Image (cartoon, grey):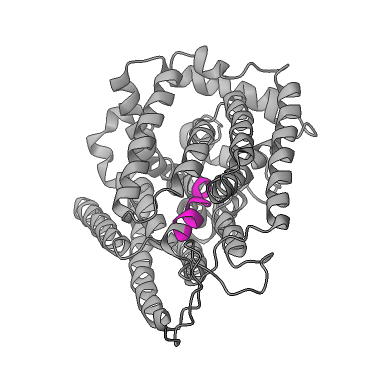
Amino acid sequence: MLTALLIFHFVACVALIIFSAFRMTRGITLMNAFVIIFTLCGCMGVSLFGFFQESLPAVQYSDVALYRALVANLIFVICATAALALEAHLFKRKAPHRTAFRIIPTGFEVKAIVVAASLFITGFLTIWLGKAGKLENPFAAYKETGGSGQYYQYRKLIEEDVSGRVGEGTFTAKKLSFNISPLILILLAYLFYKTKNVLYLALLVLQSIPPLMVAGILAHKSYLLVAIAAPVLALGVWKLKGYSAAIVVSILAVLFVIGGTAIFHATLNSTVGVAAGELFARVFLVPAFTPIFYYEVVPDALPFRGLLQSLYIYHVQAPAWDYAIYDVAHHATGKPYGANAHFLAVGFTGAGFAGVLFVVLLCLALILLFDYFLIELEPSHRLVAICCSGFGFISILSINLLGAFENGFLLGSLVFYALCRGIAASNTPPQTEAGVPLLPSNATA
């Protein structure tokens, strides 16, 4: 029975990825990008545990926990398939009635806000680095560790010595570096290409350095990857106009593999082959494996928390009536540590499979709503809007739904869409990038 369910689960995941990729060939959307990433990295690996046991943590899990994980994933797969089909139907109906898109306004007010934001981010992070640099040397976690165990021990010390210091601005530094900074970099690149003013390019280069140093101190591999990719993506995304989504995704995938392998090579102090293997495990297996802890202990050792609690879970300390991810890890492995899991597993702790269904429907409904508005943007701007939620796509693989929103999931896209709608624009008719006014859908040339 379980073997048949494993096979069905794998086939269903592959079919969903193919269906979503097919939809992407007709236009990239938040929905098909999210479905592919989450299914590939957060779900499909459950069917592969038996083939990659040596790459997984040495933790035993029961058939019951595996069954719960498979069912939760299948709930997502079924709902995501329905959401993709519904999105295609809605967009087909909306197409004849779409309003003319507006490119990002380039008035003085917008330029001033972008420049001021860039200077603020650079200045704040520089001040924070001056304080944190006295406690921790940048990139020490990558230079002074020789394996995953040492690296995570080192990171725990950093969390105590740097991140755990209240009132030092670390939380703000993280948000500025990995949520707000990528959006400002994209806008600086846009202004540079539109005006050819090297000031914007200089600000882009200057602003790119502090987040890299912040990532080096905080020693999170995902932070470092975002810090490296953000300026490259900001400069490159505006040059991708006219290319298909498949080419864009392929380029991003190659850059991710190269960058990720380099980071694991530095972290483990190992060969390139071992680093590539660790990257594969961390991307495709670990995000699917860690939720097993949650399905193992809830509700057998820890109780359900309530439907609304499906949206979040505490990190270290929880109220007396609740529990945190450290408690889940302690009951599952005997060791209390930060075992983050994706939003499906957190949903299960809230109300079982009903909690999973609740968070899945809420998540997909919000993505569908955002896509309904983003479809008004022309393809290159829509791709940028999706990239503005990039770190949120990474975080939702190892965090609860509310935490993913906090990390920029969908919110970055919302801000970019607001800019494209021309909040600060004049009342002149919207124009294309070629400068030709757009006509209403019922007008003739």
Q: Which residues are magenta?
A: 381-392
Query: Would residue 167 be visible to someone looking at this image?
Result: yes
Residue 60 on image: x %, y %: 36, 35
Q: Nearer the viewer, residue 246 or 77?
A: 246
In the image, residue 384 lies in the stretch drawn in magenta:
yes
Q: Where 445 sits versus 154, above or below?
A: below
Residue 431 as seen in the image, left or right of residue 86: right
Residue 72 on image: x %, y %: 39, 57
Q: Where 99 sits versus 356, above or below?
A: below
Query: Would residue 339 be visible to someone looking at this image?
Result: no
Q: Nearer the viewer, residue 375 or 62?
A: 375
Residue 375 as seen in the image, left or right of residue 220: left
Residue 352 as seen in the image, left or right of residue 125: left
Residue at 70% in and 22% down: 161
Q: Where 367 sits versus 229, above or below?
A: below
Residue at 69% in and 64% down: 424
Q: Where 351 sits versus 44, above or below?
A: below
Instruction: Give the position of the N terminus as an image quadrant.
Output: bottom left
In the image, residue 425 lies in the stretch drawn in magenta:
no
Residue 47 on image: x %, y %: 26, 46
Residue 178 on image: x %, y %: 59, 40
Residue 29 as seen in the image, left or right of residue 81: right
The overriding secondary structure of the stretch rendered in magenta is: helix
Q: Nearer the viewer, residue 125 or 344?
A: 125
Residue at 53% in and 51% down: 388
